[in-house]
Image (cartoon, grey):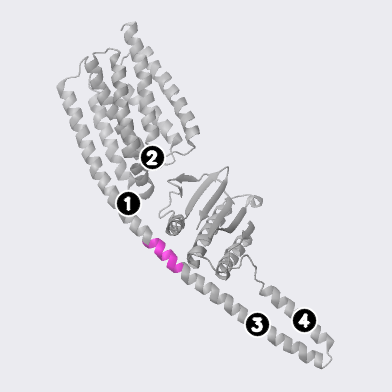
Amino acid sequence: MTVMDQLLNTVSLFTGITYFSIITFLATPLRYSVKKSVIITIFSILINFVLNMYFVLRFNVGLPHRIFLLTIPAVMFLYQDMISSESGYRQIFIFFTSWWINLMLIFFTSVSRVLAQGDSVYLLMEFYTFMPICGFVVFFFRKSFFDIIQKIDRGWAKFATVPASFFAILFLIHTQPFSPNFNNDYIFVSILIFAIAISVYKVINVYFLNACRYQDKTKANEILRIHTEFQKKSVDSINQKLRDLEDFRNQTVSMFQDIYEALSENDAERSIEHIAEIGDTIKAYEFEYFCENYVLNTILSKYIHKAREENIDVSVRVSVPESVNIDVIELCLVFSNAIENAINASLKIKNVQDRKISVLASMADDRICIRIINRFEGKVHIINGLPYSGRHNHGIGTRSMMSIAEKYGGFCSFEAKDNIFSLNMVL
């Protein structure tokens, strides 16, 4: 191997690993911020390059060589697992899918190498091969792929076998002894495998789209059920408050009558006892006032009381009038979902002193501006604008809030940073 060939192999190895890493980065839902993920990607490229250069120098191998079909993906798997917000079979599916795309690059660059006859023109042809594949991932693949990952809740063990099978077949093909020039059989078989892979992915994509539509309908029905149940609970809660007020009125009238009778008989001691009973009754029926809107105030009282029973420090500043331009039940649904999620997150905090929730709401140009903040422990992933959880039927409450915001031409955003989760809404 000449010095020029060795230099060409070194540059080709570095550019290849860089291209693979970029495609893998674009096809991966990120766990961290883009800046942090880019830094991890750069370190991964350097580590992968140094490791594979060791094999080049130690065993005096050139490109292409089957050893790189093991070493490069192995390091890439660890890198992708580090930056990916997914885990388990989802992550395996994402890894082999990104490597199916990388194998497209390997195939076309291998053909380019043959056409370039090992000349440095190959590097330029490799770049022109990488650009359309990268564009395909960014403009046609990435968004729908991420939507599928987020929406499909189960079946990933079966789905992961599809890209894994294609990777295994292509690996077996590439492990055959390389010759200086690729023969027609190799090119024909590779093209056939890629054609089959594209067809199968097309079928999977159609299935995913249908499954997503089904899940969207299921979740829409679930949101409707939540609305219905919440309306029933709201009516029950209001009726209970009205019954409490009626009981309070009756007891107060009865006690004042007793006081009047005791004063008429000049029985001061019995009068004082009845007055003390009134104080106790008022404490028992104490109503906390948060805003002018009676229905919303009732819901806030319920959930704020629940939070304080769990030793959560809650601060409330809500200014919502009795008359609003949106359905008051949907408004209450937003607050109840948000505060309940904040309570559940706060209960996972071990240090009780760190359990804090802030509920803010005010009017601005006939719009209701809502901001609910709470502390949390662990990690919260925001994917496609929604907080993500791996639980089955996750995100029904947050989706219902998003749909309410869209219904009234407002917006809803979620942010998780420095162990502080915040919901911002305009209705």
| Residue identified by numbered label 1 | 212
Q: Secondary structure at mark 1?
A: helix
Return the x and y of residue 246 as percentages of the image width and height. Answer: 61, 81
Residue 249's mark? 3
Q: Work out which residue is located at the far bottom of the displayed protein and give it.
A: 265
Q: Secondary structure at mark 4?
A: helix
In space, the residues marked 3 and 4 are separated at their CA atoms by: 15 Å
| Residue identified by numbered label 2 | 91
Q: Earlier in the sequence, mark 3 or mark 1?
A: 1
| Residue identified by numbered label 4 | 275
Q: Earlier in the sequence, mark 3 or mark 4?
A: 3
Q: Is residue 364 positioned above or below 49 on the image?
A: below
Q: Is residue 23 positioned above or below 204 on the image?
A: above
In space, the residues marked 1 and 4 are separated at their CA atoms by: 64 Å
Whether tag 3 and tag 1 are in contact, CB under 8 A, the answer is no
Q: Name the main secondary structure of what is drawn in magenta.
A: helix
In space, the residues marked 2 and 4 are separated at their CA atoms by: 69 Å
Whether tag 3 and tag 4 are in contact, CB under 8 A, the answer is no
From the viewer's perspective, is the residue at label 2 or at label 4 nearer?
4
